[in-house]
Image: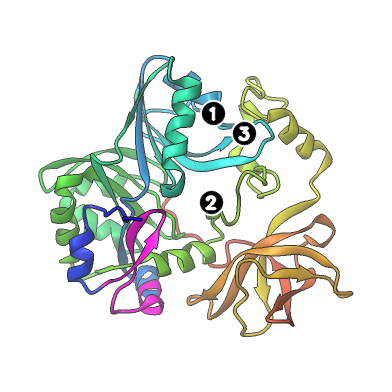
């Protein structure tokens, strides 16, 4: 299979990146700095990530917000211009088809960022269900996406566009960077302050080079992106959630807007609403929790979780080493009876039991700028 390339592919090679297949793309997993140092640099200064493999989609039309609301449990109708929200596409059983960001560009215009591995099916899903109600424009080839993350991100980006310093977490707008009109949101996937920048594909390399020329910025690969999001307690689609899990199973009840809940003024109206509302009333059999291994043994995805008697009570959905935390960290699904904070459970790693405690997420405090 031929792997797709982002507009920054040649730059990654020039920077000495180790490339790996990811979601159908040839992507940088790390640079010569190495995953550990890349992770810590992002926490301390600013890291630049190429996330151009993600799917960018524009919806246009007076009915676009109402139409999109039929596919997600979040409030889109009242989303103000210049803000974005986290959403999930649900299926008829309440399972999660994908998670995405939805921004309002204008009164009749929405901007979506969906996961790389799901973008073709998400586009088909939108066209099948709301294609007759609004214009759906995929921007997969037209635009690249860069993420500038870390405490120095604001200082760096404000050198190119001073107005971005006034933005707060989840604000979204246009900014001219190097004379090019870009979409900028103050958000990211690391738990740090930072920005995601949608830039025309043919202008992406010049912008990336300009940002990397700043003394605070290093190029960061997928390896550190994963350890950063894991420490921040953020879900990865296809690992911590999928069609077998609902937002309630995945501990994402907050992603169901108040007005869309069972007692809200626009209750339901999205796929699987009845099952999701039933789970909110009655509880779930198993739920996603944070897990802190009590030994210095990394506990990886897929490891079985057992109780004191050795009975299987769940599985690890994401796991690895947390460089900021200085130890192993994981998330997983456990039976509701064992999901309380500080519950003592065990992961089975290469036939041996590793003691773990159910822990609160995020494992490292999030530092989003809320003004």
Residue 102 seen in this snapshot: yes
Seen at 49% across and 61% down, the residue is: 229
Q: Which residue is mark 1?
A: 75
| Residue 268: quadrant of the picture | top right
* Depth order, front residue of 52/289: 52
Q: Which residue is mark 2?
A: 237
Residue 75 at x, y percent in the picture: 54, 28
Q: Is residue 263 left or right of residue 326?
A: right
Q: Earlier in the sequence, mark 3 or mark 1?
A: 1
Residue 241 at x, y percent in the picture: 60, 50
- Mark 1 packing: few (<14 Cα in 10 Å), some, or many (20+)? many
Query: Is 30 in the magenta?
Result: yes
Q: Which residue is mark 3?
A: 91
Query: Is 66 in the magenta?
Result: no
Looking at the image, is 199 positioned above or below residue 190? above
Q: Is residue 214 left or right of residue 257?
A: left
Residue 285 at x, y percent in the picture: 81, 50
Q: Earlier in the sequence, mark 3 or mark 2?
A: 3
Q: Earlier in the sequence, mark 2 or mark 1?
A: 1
Disc 2 from disc 1: Cα separation? 21 Å
| Residues in magenta, as a range | 17-39
Disc 3 from disc 2: Cα separation? 15 Å
Task: Determine which of the numbered discs, if any, sits on residue 65 in the image.
Answer: none
- Mark 2 packing: few (<14 Cα in 10 Å), some, or many (20+)? some
Seen at 70% across and 48% down, the residue is: 249
Total count of labels = 3
- Mark 3 packing: few (<14 Cα in 10 Å), some, or many (20+)? some
């Amino acid at each position: 299979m031929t792997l797709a390339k982002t507009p920054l592919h040649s730059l990654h090679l020039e920077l000495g990146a180790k490339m790996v297949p990811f979601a159908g793309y040839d992507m940088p997993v790390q640079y010569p700095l190495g995953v550990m140092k890349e992770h810590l640099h992002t926490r301390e200064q600013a890291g630049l990530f190429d996330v151009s493999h993600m799917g960018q989609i524009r919806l246009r039309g007076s009915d676009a917000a109402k139409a999109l609301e039929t596919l997600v449990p979040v409030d889109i109708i009242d989303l103000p211009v210049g803000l974005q929200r986290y959403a999930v596409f649900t299926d008829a059983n309440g399972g999660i088809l994908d998670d995405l960001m939805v921004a309002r560009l204008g009164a009749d215009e929405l901007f979506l960022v969906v996961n790389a591995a799901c973008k073709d099916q998400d586009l088909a899903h939108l066209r099948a269900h709301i294609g007759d109600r609004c214009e759906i424009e995929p921007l997969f080839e037209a635009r690249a996406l860069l993420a500038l993350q870390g405490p120095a991100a604001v200082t760096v980006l404000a050198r190119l566009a001073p107005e971005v310093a006034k933005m707060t977490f989840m604000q979204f707008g246009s900014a001219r960077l190097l004379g090019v009109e870009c979409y900028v949101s103050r958000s990211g996937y690391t738990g740090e302050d930072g920005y995601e920048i949608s830039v025309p594909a043919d202008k992406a390399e010049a912008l990336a080079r300009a940002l990397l020329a700043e003394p605070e910025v290093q190029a960061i690969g997928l390896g550190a992106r994963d350890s950063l999001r894991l420490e921040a307690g953020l879900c990865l689609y296809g690992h911590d959630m999928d069609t077998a899990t609902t937002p309630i199973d995945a501990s994402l009840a907050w992603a169901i807007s108040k007005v869309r809940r069972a007692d809200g003024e626009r209750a339901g109206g999205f796929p699987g609403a009845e099952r999701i509302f039933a789970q909110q009333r009655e509880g779930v059999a198993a739920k996603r929790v944070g897990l802190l291994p009590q030994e210095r043994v990394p506990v990886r995805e897929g490891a079985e979780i057992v109780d004191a008697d050795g009975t299987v009570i769940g599985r690890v959905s994401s796991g690895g080493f947390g460089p900021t935390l200085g130890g192993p960290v994981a998330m997983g699904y456990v039976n509701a009876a064992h999901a309380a904070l500080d519950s003592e459970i065990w992961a089975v790693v290469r036939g041996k039991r590793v003691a773990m405690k159910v822990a609160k997420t995020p494992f490292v405090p999030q530092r989003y700028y809320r003004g």
